[in-house]
């Protein structure tokens, strides 16, 4: 894996999570990865947060890299690629992996203006601790081998799935935005504990471990969540009493509609006409 060299264009929240995750996992060496930011004034601070070189020269970083990760905000992603092509920085044909929400493969291929191997990826922030979720879609010039390279890069950081691009905005609304939804759920569960007298730190630990454990039950057993829920629900017990109260508050449809809304919103982020 050390033969892979990576340029992280946009070393913000996600760029740092992915770059540092790859470094920790040994996917790249510290010399084999470099990052960029847009503003020179930000570079010093970012350098203090990561263990690899960071500056503002996208083209120089790309010329050193076999894999280019585009981690800028969505509205800037296509322009970054277009500028790189204009500067001749793509002539060595690096693999381009874009994590920009709502930016289609077609828009990226068009922006490059020359044949480029593009993979669209949707990660999430738990990649930082090796517990992320990443979905990959291949562009028209990307091969199975390119998908294998992307999967090798992301596997130490996340569960990795390959899906058709048509699902990417929904993936963004579910697993891309999802950690934020779950943090609110953890906070809310903890508030319930605090309301009933638990110290906040204890309540937060109980809530977070409960979410983690329940998630592992779903993933490790492969059982339907409803069946696992039934196991916890003793007739006339406290859990069914609480579940009915949650249903009265429309918890289920509120969460599902939240994902739907995030997916709709993701579709507009790249500024493309649908
Ligand atoms: N945050 C998430 O949970 C999440 C999850 C999945 C996917 N994503 C995707 O990840 C991407 C980044 O999101 P984020 O939350 O990490 O954003 P962020 O924290 O704002 O980071 C964006 C970074 O891009 C840099 N940048 C902007 N224009 C650039 C350019 N032309 N060349 C080089 N660097 C440039 C910025 O530099 P300056 O600071 O100097 O402006 C900043 O470091 C987005 O496209 C988003 O859709 C995010």
Image: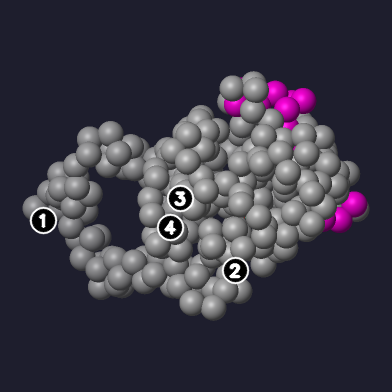
Q: Secondary structure at mark 2?
A: loop
Q: Which mark is nearer the camera, 4 or 1?
A: 4
- Which comes before the other along the chain, label 1 or label 3? 3
Instruction: Tell whether 268 sits left or right of 159.
Output: right
Q: Pointers 1 and 3 in contact (CB under 8 A)?
A: no
Give the label on residue 270, or none: 2
Q: Pointers 3 and 4 in contact (CB under 8 A)?
A: yes
Q: Position of residue 33 (x, y in %)?
A: 73, 32
Residue 206 is at least partly visible in this image: no
Q: Position of residue 208 (x, y in %)?
A: 44, 44
Q: Is residue 27 magenta?
A: yes
Real-space Cα distance between discs 1 and 3?
A: 47 Å
Q: Pointers 2 and 3 in contact (CB under 8 A)?
A: no
- Which comes before the other along the chain, label 1 or label 2? 1
Real-space Cα distance between discs 2 and 3?
A: 17 Å
At x 19%, y 42%, the residue is 223
Q: Position of residue 104 (x, y in %)?
A: 53, 62
Of residues 129 and 143, the one nearer the viewer is 143
Q: Which mark is nearer the camera, 1 or 3?
A: 3
- Which comes before the other along the chain, label 2 or label 3? 3
At x 21%, y 65%, the residue is 244
Of residues 223 and 141, the one nearer the viewer is 141
Q: Secondary structure at mark 1?
A: loop
**Which residue is label 4 attached to?**
165
Instruction: Tell whether 199 sits left or right of 16.
Output: left
Q: Secondary structure at mark 4?
A: helix
- Which comes before the other along the chain, label 4 or label 2? 4
Q: Secondary structure at mark 3?
A: strand
* Residue range (magenta): 26-40
Give the label on residue 143, or none: none
């Amino acid at each position: 894996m050390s033969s892979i060299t990576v340029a992280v264009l946009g070393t913000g929240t996600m760029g740092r999570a992915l770059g540092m995750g790859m470094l920790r996992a040994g996917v790249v060496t510290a010399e084999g990865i470099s990052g960029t930011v847009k503003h020179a004034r930000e570079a010093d601070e970012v350098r203090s947060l990561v263990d690899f070189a960071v500056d503002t020269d996208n083209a120089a970083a790309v010329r050193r890299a076999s894999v280019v990760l585009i981690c800028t905000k969505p509205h800037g992603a296509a322009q970054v690629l277009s500028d790189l092509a204009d500067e001749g920085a793509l002539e060595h044909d690096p693999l381009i992996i874009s994590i920009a929400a709502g930016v289609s493969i077609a828009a990226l291929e068009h922006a490059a203006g020359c044949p480029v191997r593009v993979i669209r990826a949707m990660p999430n922030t738990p990649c930082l601790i090796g517990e992320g979720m990443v979905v990959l879609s291949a562009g028209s010039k990307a091969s199975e081998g390119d998908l294998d390279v992307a999967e090798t890069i992301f596997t130490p950081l996340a569960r990795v799935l390959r899906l058709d691009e048509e699902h990417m905005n929904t993936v963004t609304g579910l697993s891309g935005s999802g950690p934020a939804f779950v943090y609110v759920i953890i906070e809310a569960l903890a508030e319930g504990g605090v309301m009933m007298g638990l110290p906040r730190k204890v309540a937060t630990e109980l809530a977070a471990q409960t979410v983690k454990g329940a998630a592992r039950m779903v993933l490790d057993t492969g059982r339907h969540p409803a069946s696992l829920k039934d196991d916890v629900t003793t007739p006339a017990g406290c859990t069914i009493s609480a579940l009915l109260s949650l249903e009265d508050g429309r918890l289920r449809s509120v969460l599902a509609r939240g994902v739907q809304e995030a997916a709709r919103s993701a579709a507009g982020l790249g500024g493309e006409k649908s």
